[in-house]
Amino acid sequence: MLLIMLGTPIRDRQAERREATRAEIIAAAWAIAEHKGLAGLTLRDVALAVGMQAPSLYSYFESKNAIYDAMFGQAWTEYLDIVTAAEPTLPKDPRAALKVVAHTFFDFAIANTTRHQLMNERTIPGFVPSPESYAPAVAVVELARRDLARIGMSGDADFDLYIALVGGLINAQQANEPGGDRWARLLDVAIDMFADHLGLAAPKKRAR
Amino acid sequence: MLLIMLGTPIRDRQAERREATRAEIIAAAWAIAEHKGLAGLTLRDVALAVGMQAPSLYSYFESKNAIYDAMFGQAWTEYLDIVTAAEPTLPKDPRAALKVVAHTFFDFAIANTTRHQLMNERTIPGFVPSPESYAPAVAVVELARRDLARIGMSGDADFDLYIALVGGLINAQQANEPGGDRWARLLDVAIDMFADHLGLAAPKKRAR
DNA sequence: GTCTATACACCGATAGAC
DNA sequence: GTCTATCGGTGTATAGAC
C-alpha cells in the first residue's frame, strides 16, 4: 500500500511528526485546563506535561493564544461531528426536533464545561479565534439553521431568539449552580414555550 | 451643627479620609477597566492614576481581588438604587411590568458593559464576590422577585426562566454584536412570548 | 528543525526603612 | 501611610547547541 513516485513521496513523515506533536500539546493543554481552569493554563505546565522546556512550544505554536485557538477549533470540530452524526436521526415532529437540537447543545456544554467556556464564553482576556478555527463554529450554526429551517423556522429573529434562550439557560446553570439541574430541568419547558411562540402544533396536552 | 460629646467625637476624620481615598481608588479602577478592559486592570496603573506607588494600595485594599470586590458591590448598589427608584412607577398591567423590569436590566447591561461584565459574568479568573458585596445583588433579586410575584408570577421556575431569557439576550448581544441592536430588538418579542407562556392577558392584538 | 539556556518586561504581592 | 527594594511567577523573545 506504500506507493512512491520518484521524487514525490506520498507521506511527509516530518509534517506527520510535527502534527502529532501539536496534537499531543493540545491534548496536554486540555488536561491541564480541565484541572486548573482555562485561565490557569501556563506554558510551563504544558511543556512539562509533554517533556519539553517552555520556549520549545514556540516551535509548534507561535503564542499561547495560538494554543487556545487550536483548542477552540478542535472543540468546535468535535461538536460539529456530534451534530453531523445526530442529524439523520432528528425527529420529523418539529417540536420534538427543537428539543433534540437544544438538548444536544445543552448537554454538551454541561458535560464539557471547559470546552464550553472556551467555545462560547469570552473568558480568556486577549483571545480572539482565528477565521480557520472559527470555521467549524460557523458550520455548526449553518447546520442548525438548516435543520430548523426544515422545521419551518424561517427568519433570523426566531433563530437568534432560540440561540439566546438555550444559551441563557446554560449560562444560568453554569454560573449559579454548576453541577446542578435547576436550569436544566427548565429546558423542555423553555422549548415548549418557544414552540408555542412559533405556533407549532402541540404534542398532546393543551386541548383547549 | 457640629456636636461633640467629650471623648466621643461624632466624626472620625481619619476613617472619613480613608474611605474617601478608597472611593478615589475605585473610581480610578473603573476608568482604567473601561479603557483597557476589566482583565487589563493593573495595580500599577491604578496607583499611577491616584498618585501612589503600587504597594501603597495595599494600605487600602488587601489584594487586587478586594478592589474587584469593592467594584462589584458598588455596581450592584448602583443598580439597586435604579431599581428601587423605578419601582413605584411600575405599570399595573402585568405584561407591561414584565417589559419594564426586563428593559431596565437589559439597558443597564448594554449601557455599562464593564459593570455588567463584572456583575454578571465570571470573567475574572480568581474572583469570587464576598458576602458583603454580594448583598446588594441579592437585594436586587429579592426586589425583582417581589415585583414579579405581585404580577402573579409564583414559583421559582418561572422566575429562573425569566432571568435566563433576559440574560441570554444580553449575552448574545454583547458577545456577537457589541454596540448593535440585533438582539435588543428581540427583547419585547421575547417578553411577549414569556407572558403568553405565563397565560397573561394579551395587550391588544391576538384576537384569534 | 528542535530544543536548551538565558533573559526580558510585566504582573501581584511582601518586607522593611522612614 | 508611603516609600524603595525585591520576590516568585507569567508570557514571550532570541541566541545558539545539536
Image: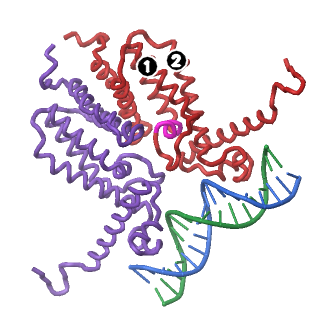
Chain colours: A red, B purple, C green, D blue
Report the magenta residues as a range: A114-120
Q: Classify A67 as above or below B96.
A: below
Q: Is residue A137 left or right of residue B111?
A: right
Task: Note whether A39 is above or below A208 in the view shown.
Answer: below
Q: Using the image, tell me which numbered label, if any, was put on residue A86.
A: 2
Residue that mark 1 sits on = A100
Relative to residue B52, is residue A65 drawn left or right?
right
Q: Which quadrant holds the N terminus of chain B?
A: bottom left
Chain identity of mark 1: A
| Label 1–label 2 contact, CB within 8 A | yes
Q: Amino acid at mark 2?
A: Ala
Nearer to the camera, B198 or A14: A14
Looking at the rendered structure, the secondary structure element under dot 1 is helix
Residue under the point 20% across and 51% down: B82
Subunit bearing disc 2: A
Residue A185, visible in the rendered structure: no
